[in-house]
Amino acid sequence: KAGVTQTPRYLIKTRGQQVTLSCSPISGHRSVSWYQQTPGQGLQFLFEYFSETQRNKGNFPGRFSGRQFSNSRSEMNVSTLELGDSALYLCASSFSQSSYNEQFFGPGTRLTVL
Amino acid sequence: AQSVSQHNHHVILSEAASLELGCNYSYGGTVNLFWYVQYPGQHLQLLLKYFSGDPLVKGIKGFEAEFIKSKFSFNLRKPSVQWSDTAEYFCAVNTNAGKSTFGDGTTLTVKP
């Protein structure tokens, strides 16, 4: 079974630009969560989608948004990029919304904002 | 809101030494607990999880963790570490579907 895939793997943008990151979950998984990983803040939860609906949201500004498609693939968008948005963005999928399901993580997209 | 604390930011051990990484969480209700590991250059992957039953859970590669409800703790242990255990370890709590709260991580360096 293929794992969680994320594209692109690396991205360099400048301040003020916007970016879209993509995540394809494991086949059959319907829950997709996004996390921001930085050396100083660890893994911070961004949001979670299940059946095309955002079910949970973390404490990030409205510049961070996402969506999920009917095939469970998800995209995350960051508008008006700031230097502090430089991070590794991780996508994780799980079979259902149950909180005892483990999450399977992708390799991440490394975003650098100059 | 729930939070997770990992007491050790960086642990350095020699091979064959015993390991214990601390994890405490704050949440008053039922929790599901996880330890994830991130080997250099690899994805985060599950080491072990606890959601009910025997509070001592065993995971992959000889790791185990004990859930102590009264102490809000879920410490990770391994009797004898190997060089290949060098990685970053994350404790996580999940109380609400796809939203996990992670600790800041502990970097383990095992000297051969």
Image (cartoon, helix red, strand yellow):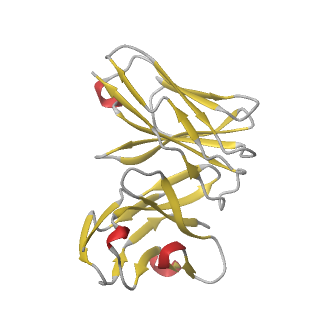
Q: Tell me if residue B102 comes above or below residue B47 in the rendering.
A: above
Whole-percent x and y of residue B40?
36, 54
Residue A109 appears left or right of A74: left
User: In front here: A98 or A21?
Assistant: A21
Task: Say which residue appears at 51% left-offset and 40% top-offset.
Answer: A58
Residue B54 occupies quadrant: bottom right
Residue extending farthest front: B112
Whole-percent x and y of residue B52?
66, 75
- Camera sees residue B18: yes
Residue extending farthest top: A16
User: In front here: B50 or B77?
Assistant: B77
Residue A61 occupies quadrant: top left
Residue A110 appears left or right of A55: left
Q: Tell me if residue A100 comes above or below residue B74 in the rendering.
A: above
Residue A105 appears left or right of A50: left
Task: Say which residue appears at 72% left-offset and 51% top-offset.
Answer: A96
Task: Say which residue appears at 70% left-offset and 33% top-offset.
Answer: A53
Whole-percent x and y of residue A111?
38, 30
User: In front here: A44 or A110?
Assistant: A110
User: In front here: B89 or A2?
Assistant: A2
Task: Say which residue appears at 67% left-offset and 45% top-offset.
Answer: A26
- Camera sees residue B63: no
| Quadrant (top left, top right, bottom left, bottom right) of the C terminus of chain B | bottom left
Q: Tell me if residue B102 comes above or below residue A22 in the rendering.
A: below
Whole-percent x and y of residue A93?
62, 46
Q: Tell me if residue B8 comes above or below residue A105 in the rendering.
A: below
